Image (tube, coloured by chain):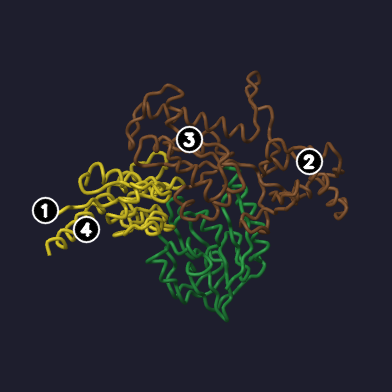
Chain colours: A brown, B yellow, C green
Amino acid sequence: MPDLPKKKIGIVSCSGEELPEGTVTRLAALKVLEQLRPADTVTICLPLFLAGGEGDRAFAKFYPTIAVDGCELRCAARATGMYSSKPAASLVVRDIVIETGLEKPEGRRHLNPAGRQAVEATAARMVALVDGLLGKQWDRRAGEFVQEPPNPEPQGLGEATCSCGLGTPIQKVQIEGQEVTLVALPLIFQQFRQAGKQPSESIARELLDTVKIYNSVPEGMDIQYRAVLLREYSAFCEKEPAQ
Amino acid sequence: MSVQRKVVIVPCSGIGKTYGTVSREAAYEIVEDLRPKDAQLVALSMLVLGDESTRAAVAGNQAITIDGCKLACASKMVKENGGRVAQEIAVLDVYRRYKQFKPNGIAELNEGGLHLAHALAEEVAISIDNLRSKNKEGQNA
Amino acid sequence: MAEFLETTIDKFIFKVATDRSYSSEGLWVKAEGDRLRVGLSDFLQQRSGDVAFAEVKPEGTLLKMGDEIASIESIKVNISLTSPVSGTIVKVNPAMTTTPESINQDPYGEGWLVILEDGNVTKAALLDPQAYLALMKGQAEQEAKNQ
């Protein structure tokens, strides 16, 4: 059975040196990457990203990212949008400090206590976003996550077949007269086929849920996407023998 | 009256490796402790994304870039954005000269990393002095 | 010029040159006439990190398969590399002294380690590119999982 890549969230922090808030973004990002959600997140190195880092840009193009900026210049968010895809979420430390009523961070080289509190607050926001993007829900009674995302064992992707260099197969479909590129669709179809799933309305819903892990579906377009996925999957099943 | 310009220090501040933090810490030591009157710090992303005052600072002054690894992102991007790079420092090269200072940690440098950053900062401080001497000679000529 | 097989784990792209064989440790061997050139695979160099120092056995060293051929030191690791073949070292890459980071920048080209003569390749001990790709993918996925 073909394996789908594990969904991870890319973290892009501005790490701006000139302001304490830049240092807050750096430390908050590292806290999430190293301690809080190490299995679910990947660091995107902003300087490498700006300089043309192939792997970082490709990752940010097809996986959700969270941009964390120190100030309203939003260098991380803008760079991500410019060179890959718009971040799934964008945080600004200055806004978090105001919203949480913290004192202004000081000390760009060595953060003061207010700065360290800002790190904690920012990291907490990031974790909530990571969990939300991964579709996890917290059961307070049980003290654990209740809805694990469809999360196959992390596997490699095989030879590159798309021009992005990421190695994930893509398929183009027509939805309401527009050509739409859907990442991982061939693999999704193969996986469903090998699981013996016959084309049906309920399978179409399942297909859409899986497609949404790797692609953003515009709001209000679920019905149209489901119809197209059902049509494409039916055509796929006609061509591919059942296993 | 001669006007001495400040040398622009551009660290990569890469977040993926300890070397990136060494570059950042060294840059801070240069502009805050060792040569506060002669050097200024510039954030790489602000330069690349077109912040006007950052671009003006880089266009008008010589730059010393400090890169964490041989991908040399800071050096590359400063050159591509109109900067004159007087010296390119690679933390890895400095580590080879100070093998006893093995850095570790990204969020917080270990003692080896702090010593390495300090050694690097001292070397850059001397480079800044040399650059400013040359500039002064050029102006007096 | 070599062609490559490629795989991606998270944001990391790993390449396997198709014109050479591989040890399970991640060293490649390329036949060049009656000589053998040896170096590190892309996966091994990425996993090791930026190479600060590379100490390679000197020219004239007679190696048996499994003998130490070089040791590399990066910020992350100090690793001893074992020779995937036997033979006599006739040339050591001079870049290993001056710019060992060429292992990272061009592992299948400028970053070679040594050239051997009178080489004896035990084919059963080496993997073809496809087999190495499969092995390497498993290792990379396991490392991504363990993070």
Marks 4 & 2 on one chain: no
Q: Is the residue under label 4 in contact with that under label 1 (CB below 8 Å)? A: no
Q: Residue at 67% across / 47% down in the picture? A: A5
Residue on which the image places disc 3: A31
Position of C69 relative to B63 (above/below) = below
Front-most of residues A160 and C17: A160
Q: Residue at 41% across / 69% down in the picture? A: C95
Q: Is the residue under label 3 in contact with that under label 1 (CB below 8 Å)? A: no
Q: Residues within 10 Å of mark 3 (few under 14, many from 20)?
A: many
Helix, strand or loop under label 3: helix
Q: Is the residue under label 1 in contact with that under label 2 (CB below 8 Å)? A: no
Front-most of residues C98 and A55: A55
In the image: residue A153, left or right of residue A126: right
Residue on which the image places disc 2: A226
Mark 3 belongs to which subunit?
Answer: A
Q: Which numbered dot is residue B131?
A: 4
